[in-house]
Each structure stands twice: as C-alpha cells, then as structure tokens.
Amino acid sequence: MYYLKWTAGLLAAMLLWLAISVYGGLSGWWLSAIAPAGDTAAFTRALGEKLHAEKRGNTALVLIENGEVVAQDFSASVDTIDQDTLFPLASASKLLAAYGVLSLVESGALALDAPVSQYLTRWQLPDSEFDNNKVTVRRLLSHTAGLTDGLGFDDYKADESVPTLEESLANPRASRGEKTIEVGLEPGSEWKYSGGSYLLLELLVEETSGMSFERWMQQAVFDPLGMRRATYAYLADQDSISYSYDTSGQRAPLYRYASAAATGLSASTDDLVKFATALARPGSAPQPALGAASVDLLRQPLGYQLGAAIWGPGAMLYAPTGDDFVFGHDGSNEPAINSALRVNPANGDAIVVLSTGRAFLASSLAYEWTLWQTGYPDFFAFDTALSSAVTPALFGLAVILVVFVALLVRRRRRVHN
C-alpha cells in the first residue's frame, strides 16, 4: 500500500510538471526573442539577418513605432521593389474587407447581429438542419457562423473567365477538394475557418451599398486612408509589381481570384503602413475612417481554440498584451505568396511583411516581432511553442524521478536501521 501511494504521488508530480511545461511553452517561458525587449536597433539587425538568410523571390518589410516608420527593407532577388510595389495579400485581404464591412455597420446600413438573409436578394444560404437566421455579420466576420466550407479559394488563370459572386457562392472553386458554402454547425457554437463567409460578406456589401465591392472599398477604405495603390484588379495589368515565385525561385504565373474580399487584394507596404496606422491610431487618417470603437470591435474575442482567444470579427488575435491582443491578419497562397500585418495596440507599434518565393517567410518574421513585443508566441507558432516545452519537460521529469528514487532509498535505509 505504501509503494502504491508513492507511485501515485510520483505519477501525479510528473503529470503536474508536464502540464506546467506545456503551459509554459504556450506562454513563451522557454522561448527567447531574437533581441532584447525594447532594443529596436538590435531587433532590426537580427530580423534583417533572418530575412536575408531565408529569402527567395521578393520581400518587403516595414517596422512602425508610435505611428512612425523606424525601419524598412526591400529585398529583391529579381524584381526592383520599393514601398510602392504591389504584392498579392492572399487571405490578409480579409482584414481590410472586415474594415470595409464595419464601415457599413458604423453608418447604420448594417446591423451586426441581424440575420444576413434580410439584406440579401441575389443569393441565400441553402436550407440546413440549423437556423440560418442565426448567421449574422458578427459571426461571418469571426468565422463563428457555422459555415463549414473551410475555403481555400483556388486560382483562375489569366485566360479563364472569373465567375460571378452568385456562381462562386453556389459552386466555389476550392484549392483542395469540393466545397459547399452552407451552415453545417450551430451558428455561434464554435470557430471554424470559412473563406465562404467572406464571399458572402462581399455580396452583403454590394447589396447594402448599391456598389460593387471594389468600388465600396475604394470609397470607404482606400481613399480615406490614402492607400493609393491598393487594388482588386488583375496584378499582371498593374505597374510596379512583385511577381510570384515558387519555392525554387522560379517565376510563377499570376492568377485571378473569384473572391475579392477573401483573397483578391494587392497592396504596397506604403498602403499597409497607412492601414496599420489607422488600426493603431484610429482617427489619424487624412479623412474620417473607422472610429476607435469599430476598430476595437475587430479584435473582440469570439473565436477560440483550446480555450485561447484566436479570432475577432475580422482580425486574428495573435498573442495577449495586457488585457488586449496583438492583432492583424496573415495570408498565404501558392505559389509561395505570404503576407503579414500585425499591430500592438498597447504601444501603437506594428509590422508589415510581404513576400513572394518563400511560403511562410512573412509569417515567420512577424512571429519574431510578436515574441519580441510581448514575450508570447503567437498562435500560428503552436508547434514551435509546444516543441520548446520538450527539453524542460524531460529535464523536470528526470529531476522528479531522481528525487523520488533518492527519497525511496533513504526511507528504506531508515526502516532497515
């Protein structure tokens, strides 16, 4: 009986330490930033070394502190790029689309929690076992509306016809497998990524504003913020662009996209610096854009995984910062398109990284920034954070086992003496 108690105690201690180790990994205890906190010069040097060691294709990087650009790097393998060069944003397009949707909410044209069906005439969600009237703007923005498509929109070649919004909603071309845009979960019950949600929001903007989605975004977002180059037009038809490259560094085709809101935006770092500043300092734009309350709404925690808040109505919530979150959006697409925009509302700092030719370079550099800013790994780096717990977990288990054996030997000696 005695040994059973000791064994139970040992197992309990080991399980407790494993739990502490994993928690510590996810909280950044075992990770080190690439530069001391607050040392912008050291961080810029370290980030530049990482960028130049790993880049292929083109990469544009800008650091912002207190609303001012403090560092930038335009690294090209082939093309000449600068702050005005257009890059494809892939899914980072969604954050700007959400900003445009919230401008309709702020004007009173849309209600966040009304059924979206009441605004739509050109297409409706198919009937399901769930109540489609629970699909709202807030839930579509945060991927909590119960849509289970998991899109992933596939590309269209330059000579292909791009379908209408209604055609894409009814029969989307997915990057993997066949997808249907429909309600497959109880709306509001859980987070599930849905590109189809943003295709539906694109239609909602058009029906509510009476304009094309592209025209509304130009009027409500790009013009007020001074985003001169941002466009949903076919990238190959524009001047001063970053071409796409595959992971071997070879130039790849430029594609068209059926969903402007979900994945179709191209922008320059100059555009995104202005957008990031508008997120960090609402009301600082040349003309009125979204107010502070609407910007705050972008990062209202609504989507959760493993109990952690990861998504708001439009923004990814990368890591906690006090009672707030570093927020923004990443995007990736084949062949090796990657973008990242992150803002720390606690100090107004931000980072913008755009790349072609390396699948996750932008996200990797932005991860380093988040860790340096907050001490926490972002949720994109779950594997890295978890891996960091392996060594301390094993070391702690070994220490527990040694202590257990030592105590057991000591007790046996006392008994025999």
Image: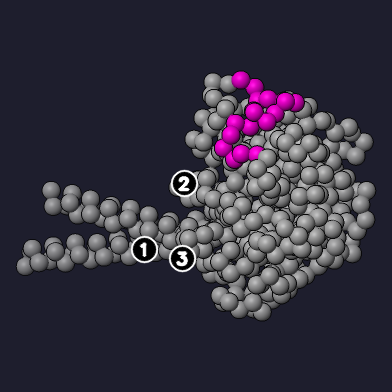
First in residue order: circle 1 vs circle 3: 3
Q: Position of residue 135 (x, y in %)?
A: 58, 32
Q: Secondary structure at mark 2?
A: loop
Task: Name the residue tied to disc 1.
Answer: 396
Nearer the observer: mark 1 or 2; the answer is: 2
First in residue order: circle 1 vs circle 2: 2
Disc 1 and disc 2 in contact, CB within 8 angstroms:
no
417 sits to left or right of 339 = left
Nearer the observer: mark 2 or 3; the answer is: 2
Q: Is residue 192 visible?
A: no
In this rendering, the answer to whether 278 lies above or below 148 is below
Q: Residue at x 91, y 48 (%)?
A: 236
As shown in the figure, which amino acid type bears the numbered disc 3? Trp
Q: CA distance from mark 1 to mark 3?
A: 14 Å
Label 1: few (<14), some (14–19) or many (≥20) C-alpha neighbours in 10 Å: some
Q: Position of residue 234 (x, y in %)?
A: 88, 45
Residue at the farthest left position: 417
Task: Name the residue tied to disc 3.
Answer: 29
Most common SS among magenta residues: loop
Towards the viewer: 122 or 53? 122
Q: Residue at x 89, y 64 (%)?
A: 80
Residue 286 image-quadrant placement: bottom right
231 sits to left or right of 410 = right
Task: Name the residue tied to disc 2.
Answer: 306
Q: Secondary structure at mark 1?
A: helix
Q: CA distance from mark 2 to mark 3?
A: 19 Å
Q: Is residue 357 magenta?
A: no
Q: Residue at x 79, y 36 (%)?
A: 210
314 sits to left or right of 386 = right
As shown in the figure, which amino acid type bears the numbered disc 2? Leu
- Which portion, as a residue range, is magenta? 110-127
